[in-house]
Image: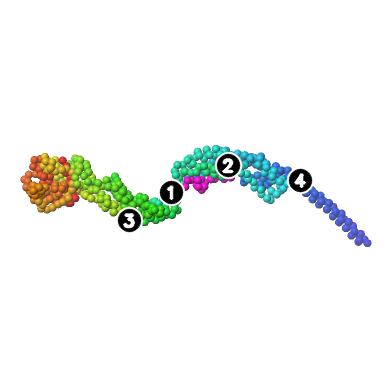
Amino acid sequence: MENDKKADNGNVRKSILHKLFDSKLKIVVWVIGIILLVIYFMGVNFYGSHFFENSTLEGVNVSSRTRDEVVGIFEDNINARKMLIEFKDSAVLLDSSAFNPEITHGEEVAQLIENQNNLLWFVGYVKPSHYSSDDFVSIDDQTLENTIRGLDQTNGTTPPSDAYVSYQDSGFVIVPEDIGTTMDVDSLIGLIKENYLLGEETFDVVEQGLYYQAELKSDNPQLMAKLELAKQYCDARITYTPDAEHTFVLDENTLLTWLTKDSAGNWTKNDDVFKRNAEAFIRTFTRYYYTLGITRNFKTATGNTVTISGGSLGQYVLVRAETNNLVELISDHAKVSRKPALFGYGYEGNQGIGNTYVEINLSAQHLYMIQNGKIVFETDQIVTGLASDPDRKTPSGCYYVYYKQIDRVLRGTQNPDGTWPYEVPVKYWMAFNRGIGMHDATYRSAFGGNIYTYAGSHGCVNMRYSEAAKMYSYTQIGTPVICYY
C-alpha cells in the first residue's frame, strides 16, 4: 500500500510540472508571435513609403530608399556622370554640362513604391526587383547638339579614301581604305543621347560606323585582281636622266595607271594603251635631250665665252624606236637607268660638245685640237672661206666630222653644162658641214693671217699638208667641230 502511495505522489508532481512547462511555452510562443506581428506591421508601414530590399532602379540600388532619397541619388549620379566619346584618332570626355540632365518624372518613383504591395514586403529579401523608366532622366537636346557640333572631331573635312593598289618598298600591296574625318553628325548626336540615357560611359564612333565609309574596300575582288595584274605587268622601273637637273622615272605606281578596265569591268592590260602611254611618257623629256643646232655659250681655248648657234652637232630622241624599247623593258620587268635611242652626235657635258673637239677661231684663223679637255695640237696656219663672199664664207656653228677620206678630188658644185668649177685633189679630207671640210692645200704657198679676207677658200679649212695629216689622225667620225668668229 505504501508503495502505491509513493507512485501516486510522483505522478501528481509530474503532471503539475508538465502543465507548468506547457504554460510557459505558450507564453513564449505568444511573445514571439506578437514580436513577429509587430515586425511585420512595422515592415508594412515602412515599405509603404520605401522600396523593398534587393530593389534596383535603372541599375542603381534603391533598397530601403524613399522617393526623395532615390531622386536625390539619381540627381547626384547624373550630375557626376561622364561619357567618353572615342573618335578615330582622339577622344573627348563629356561631363554633365554637355547634357544638362534632370530628373523629369520623380512621381514615377513614388508610384513604383506604391505598386509594391507592402503587405508582401518580406518577399524582397528573397526575390530581387529591378525597375526601369525610359523617361526618368531627360537631357537638353540643344545643349548636346551644340556641344557635339562644336567639337573639332565632328568638323573634319577629309573624305574617306578608297583602298588602292600601290608599289611600296619592294612589292605591290593593297593599301587599305581610310575613313577620313567626315561623319554623320546627326546620327552621332542621337546615339550619344540614347547611350547616355542608358547609363553607358563610353561611345566608340568608329565602332558604330558613323564615319562616312569608302566605296572601295581592301577585300574588293576587282582590287585583288588588279593586284595580281600589277605584279604581272607593272613591276618595272626605268629612269632617264638627260642632265644634272632633270630626272624622269617611269615607276611601278605610274605603270599601275596604265592598266584599264574592259567592257565587263575587269582590269586588263591593253597593249595599245601601254604603247600610247609609253610614247607620251617619252615625249615629256625629249626636249631635254634635243641639242641639234641649239644656242651654246662656248668657252674658247683662250678663256673667252662666245655664243654659237646653228650647225649639225646635236641629237634628238627617236621616239618611235624608244617607245618600242620602253615597252620591251616593261615586259622584262627591268629596273634600269637608261639613255634613250638618239639620232645624231652629242656628248656628255659642255652643252653636248663633250671634252674632245676641234675649235676653229675663224676671225683669228686659229685651229685647236682639244682632247679630254686639253690642247694636243694647235695652228694658225689655216685659210678659211673668203670672208667677203657670203657664198664662200665659212659659216659659224657647231658641227661634227661626218665623213673622212684619203685621196679625194674636191670639185665644188657641178655647172649646168656638166663641167666642174674646179677640181682639186687632196690627201686628207675631213668633211663637217656638207661640202665644207678640213683638208691639206698643197697648192697654197702661204697660210694664216688675213689671207681669208682676199684669197679665202670656197668655205673649206685649208691646212698645210703635215698639219692636215695630224688632224686626220686626231679626228674620228663624230668629232665635234666648233666654228666661230
Q: Would residue 65 appear left or right of 312 to someone viewing this image?
A: right
Q: Identify the mark nearer the N-term, 2 or 3.
A: 2
Q: Compare marks 2 and 4 and give the one earlier in the sequence.
A: 4
Name the residue furthest right.
Answer: 1
Read off the magenta span. Answer: 197-216
Q: N-terminal of the two: label 1 or label 2? A: 2
Q: Callout 3, which amino acid?
A: Ser
Q: Which residue is the site of mark 3? A: 331
Residues at discs 4 and 1 in contact (Cβ within 8 Å): no
Residue displayed at 84% across by 55% down = 18
Label 4 to label 1: alpha-carbon separation = 76 Å
Pointer 2: what residue? 81
**Mark 1 element type:** loop
Front of the two marks 1 and 2: 1
Residue annotated with mark 4: 38
- State which mark lies toward you, 4 or 1: 1
